[in-house]
Each structure stands twice: as structure tokens, then as C-alpha cells.
Image (tube, rainbow, N blue to C red):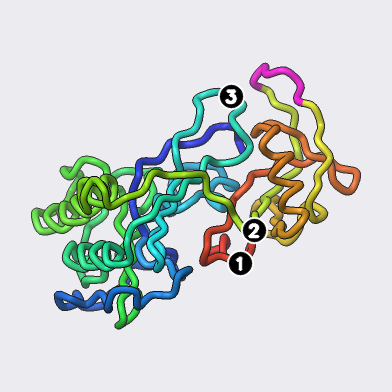
Amino acid sequence: MNGTRLLLPLLAAVLVAGTGCAKADLGAPGDTGSTGSYAADAAVVQVSYLGGFVSPDMLVTRLPLVSVYGDGRVVTEGPVIAIYPGPALPNVQVAQISVADVDKLVQLGVDAGVGANVDYGRPGITDVPDTKFAVLTPSGIKTSQVYALGEADGHGLTDPQIAARAKLKAYLGQLTDLPKTLGKDAVSESKPFEPKALAAVSRPWIADASGVGQQPEVAWPGPALPGEPVRPGFDLGCVTVTGDQLTATLAAARKANTATPWTSEGKRWSVAFRPLLPDEAGCADLKG
């Protein structure tokens, strides 16, 4: 990891396969399923950033802005202390809403046009991520992917494209402020998310050129690095950490920072940590 972390706004979303914008027809009102019809670990609503001008390891380890699960868990990335080097572990938080409110968030997404065959245009702006929306309905996953959604609307967009983008921006606003959207007592207080598995994305360690003091080495307590290749074209490997190794790795990572050199197999490595979410099983889930 490059030692800096983007502070992402609170949004809501669902993990889905693929990166293209779906071309399904807009779902009819009520296309959300009955309350409690989703599996507990199913990612039902999600908004994610894809691409953009960030480091290769961040492209692999970047968390969805918010993931809403079938049992009402809402997983987000909380604020990160503004220091360098920053904490090694991301600040992943989980809150709880009712399964009935999960249905409401799905319907709001369908109403906003997620999954509709809509032209959102492509503004003349560079190095900005796509925003991918996805909602899970009984008729399948509905997705929409929009480039530079948060940027100014005047960059060569038509009025219909601006209007379509406005609906998704409004949906983001609803997902950003769930107490306002669902009711002030509808969302529990957040608490730290406890992952059942952790992806560790490593690259050969390079001495920090920023003038920060030398960081102490830490013996890597997980599976041997670097692991399986991820992100073709870049020298990145990934291992999935579980069980007793997960406990030991989390304990070590909580004392480390983004510039810590980890030693494994006689070599030094920089490691970016990605807690795996309830619907993720391993490094393969980060390659999409």
C-alpha cells in the first residue's frame, strides 16, 4: 500500500460479478422480493468505485463504499486518521438495519434506474473512477456503471444524461444518510467489523523516500508471501489468511502501519490488507 488512504463517503451497495453496465429493463415497482427472502450473507445493495488514478494495490484492495447484506448488516469503511504512515488495517465498520429496510433500499435503487437501459454519457474528464451500483432482486442482479458521477455535469453531457445521473446521485444521497432515509432509530450504532478471513496483497518492499524514519521489520505470521498473482502486469501477490493465522495477523497488523516491512521467506514485503466481506471467500474475489 502506498501509505495514504482515501476517506470515502458513506454510501450503500452489493458485490456483483463483472464490470460492465447492465442493459436490463427497469424493474417494475415492488421488484424487491419479500422481507427476509435474501440469504444472510448475500450482498443485496452495493455501490463501488472502479478504476481511477490510484495505485495498483489500491485497485485490488479498495473496499466497496457500502455493502448491505440480506440479514441487514451494513458494512462501510469509516474515517481513517490523517497521519503518514497510516494504519495498516482499514477502518471497516458494520451497522444493522431491518430486513424490511433492506427491501426498501433495493426498491429505491430500482426506482432510481439501477439496471435500466440508460445512456449516462461520458464526461470529458480523465483519471476519475466509475461508480458501480448494484441491487439484487428476485429477477436477478441489476447493475449500472457511471463514469465520473460526482463531477460537474457540463462536460459534454446531454440534458437526458444529466437527468439520469441526478437520479443515481439522489440514490447515493439516500444511501449516504441511512438514518434520514430509513428513520433515525432504524440504523444501529456502528462497531468494528470482525472479518472471518483477510486478503493480504503484497509487493516487494522498497525503502520509503518520503523522509519518514526507518520502520521496524515485522515477521509475517500468515501464509508465505507473496502468494498467487493478482492484477496482471504488476508485481502483486495475494494470500488468504484464516483461522489461527488470521488472529495472529490481525494482532500484528494493528501494531503496524502502511510503511511496515514484513519479512517472509527471507525477503521484505509491503502488505496491503483487505478484510474479506461476508460474501467473499478469498483472493479470487478481488480480481474482478
Query: What secondary structure is the stretch in magenta mostly built from?
Result: loop
Q: Which of the marked residues, 1 or 2, is nearer the chain's N terminus?
A: 2
Dot 1: within a 10 Å radius of its alpha carbon, few (fewer than 14), some, or many (20 or more) residues?
Answer: some
Q: Secondary structure at mark 1?
A: loop
On the image, numbered disc 2 is attached to which residue?
197
Q: Secondary structure at mark 2?
A: loop
Q: Amino acid at mark 2?
A: Ala
Q: Residue furthest bottom?
A: 139
User: For the residues carrying marks 3 and 1, which lies nearer the camera in this image?
Assistant: 1
On the image, numbered disc 3 is attached to which residue?
84
Dot 3: within a 10 Å radius of its alpha carbon, few (fewer than 14), some, or many (20 or more) residues?
Answer: some
On the image, numbered disc 1 is attached to which residue?
281
* Front residue of this view, candidates 248 and 111: 248
The magenta span reads 210-215
Q: Where residue 44 sits in the image (x, y, percent)?
A: 37, 67
Q: CA distance from mark 1 to mark 2?
A: 7 Å
Q: Where residue 140 sits in the image (x, y, percent)?
A: 34, 79
* Front residue of this view, candidates 204 and 168: 168
